[in-house]
Image: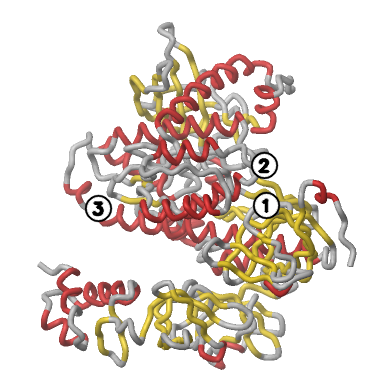
Amino acid sequence: MYDIAQLKKLFCINKKYTFKDLTKLLDVDDETLLSDLNTLEEQGIITVLSDCFQALDKNNYATENIRIYKDCGVFYFDNIKYKIHLDDINGSLKNDLCLFVIDKESKKAKVKKIIKRFNDLVVCELMDNKLKIYGDNKYVDVPSNEYSRLVEGSRVLIKLKNDGLNGNIVEIIGHKDDPGIDLIQIALSKCFSLDFSEEYLKELEKFPNHVKEDEIKGRLDLRDKLLYTIDCDNTKDMDDAISVEKKENGNYVLGVHIADVSHYVKLGSEIFKEAFKRGNSLYMLNTVIPMIHKFLSNGICSLNPSVDRLTKSCFMEIDKDGNIVDYKIVKSVIRSKKKMKYSEVNKLLEENKMVAGYEPFIDNLKLANELNNILNKARIERGYVKFMSNDLIVELDKNNKPLEFKMQEQKTAETMIENCMLMANQTVAINYSWLPFIYRIHEMPDKNTVINILQFLKKLGYNIPLIKNVDNQKALQGILRDLSSDKDFKIISNFILRGMKKAKYSTENTGHFALAYEHYTHFTSPIRRLSDLMVHILIDLYEKNNYMINEEIENLEQLLIDVSIQASFKERKAIEAENEANAMKMAEYMEGHINEYFNGKIINIDSSGVTVEVNNIIGHVNFSDIKKDSYKFNKENFTLFGKKTKQTLKIGDNVRIKVLSASKEYRTIDFAICEKLDKVKQKVLIKE
């Protein structure tokens, strides 16, 4: 049986093979072999040059992702920094995986070839009959016949090839002066569709806008139950409602009621195919590109108040220590009694203020919070690793101009709903763990990586204890808890978070490290996430087949793998899009504040310069733009040392900055550091 390990062994000796040679040596189909060879090339194990495959010669070549700055390209290989002249980047763009020809003596390199684009979709604008990459000073060549429908200022989506800056126009996005063009181009460049096909829209026509009586048969009728939704103030697609009761034995019964989207969206339908393609809903600033059409996501699938809705309910009996002692998962029908808002529930629970319209729900909300406090304590004891939230809220005016940048606060109401969803997701994962399933996993971090980060933070002066069992949740939890009151907790949390592996979806259950769960899935957002929709489809399928493993279930294995890969991929793309939209608004805000002064904090220093955060806006400082002295970078402890003043700048320092430049198009903000601030100087206005 063919094994990729056999393929690796062939390259242990420095021998060249053609593809034909390898097919003769290995009993494997061409498609599988080609896929494995691509994987080995991306991992830097082999090189592919002149149609020949051979082991990577580390004396002359390197495979790494390129960073591109204004004056040069850079990458690190075996802890050595190599520079690439801009004439030698060979059509590569930021973060592309490249094969480099290296010179170890001069520490210089050239891009030999692009192995894999970081993003093979780019937005270009027609300027002087040339297609310029938006946010870059490079131009893309496309076949001459593709220019026919373009006018000056047209913005287009281009799919790049790997050989230089060549490609083809995929879609004409619009014109630079069109309203909303910036967010549209971000979405399209991250592989999110804006429109639905005719076939899709025809399928939508068969759905009613209300629940029919015959759909309720066989479901647990919860329409008289006291249950409600709590969500953001402007949410229109509500996946989840909760109910809380207390039994005579002192235990709580938590009900988590989730929109039964799979009742409407069936496997193989056009709506499912499009949901698979999109992977999740995309939220950028004040816009939503839904995974499922708004007719369903804001209509019949949304748990709107005072109307019947089909749901899947997970009931959990929870004792005083936060343990689930019994549970059941059933199909149900509900009628939400109220659409609540986080802000208003927090006024009730945290400030003890009455909010109009909440009078009938006060006692139940207090009971829910009583359970919430128990679940909070239980998750701390379990080893839940709590990082500081990095969710940014950008406040816009009526013209979509940025006004303020705030970090999302997680108050009582937000924590309460989070705890309810965590319990339901865990319960569903446990219940179906013996069948083919999709899990939300978070693998244990690499021990050495985390130790290095903790040692780095200790060098910066933070009170980091010396611990060896960093792969234990409670050890990291303790560090973060002890430092949570530090003024630089955001910096500390983000550095430790960098050492964690990324959570993802998988058919292999390896547990969730940060949540400290052995079993965990995503069940609670089927309107917004492909993974959750697939979990609902699985629940339906297993119920239909009376939980017997048959041929239909066995054939699911590859589909579940595909769904896991796609959901993980599109989640990353959504995060990229959200971050790019936020960066665009940060730059747009600072475009109106050129030559103005702010107080900020240094959040990172590396060989490329200094990163400063000002009111949650991130900007860059070149070493040459630090006033009053010439600073040298110390790569051992990531500090800057002033040659004349002998002053040290380090991560966590407060500084006075001047805005030098900003570009909405390039998503860049350049600051100058005018002065290091102490507590006394925080309010000093520097004048030059």
- Residue tagged 1: 286
Label 3: which secondary element: helix
Residue 301: x percent and y percent?
51, 40
Label 1: which secondary element: loop
- CA separation in Å, label 1 and label 2: 9 Å
Residue depicted at 64% across the width and 33% down the height = 342
Describe residue 655's horizontal placement relative to residue 474 as left or right. Answer: right
Q: Is residue 424 above or below residue 254?
A: below
Can residue 118 be seen in the rendering of this structure? Answer: yes
How packed mark 3 is, by other alpha carbons closer than 10 Å (few <14, some 14-19, many 20 or more), is few
Residue depicted at 67% across the width and 68% down the height = 667
Q: Are marks 1 and 2 in contact (CB under 8 Å)?
A: yes
Q: Label 2 sits on what residue type?
A: Asn
Q: Label 3 sits on what residue type?
A: Glu
Residue depicted at 70% across the width and 65% down the height = 646
Q: Are marks 2 and 3 in contact (CB under 8 Å)?
A: no
- Residue tagged 3: 557
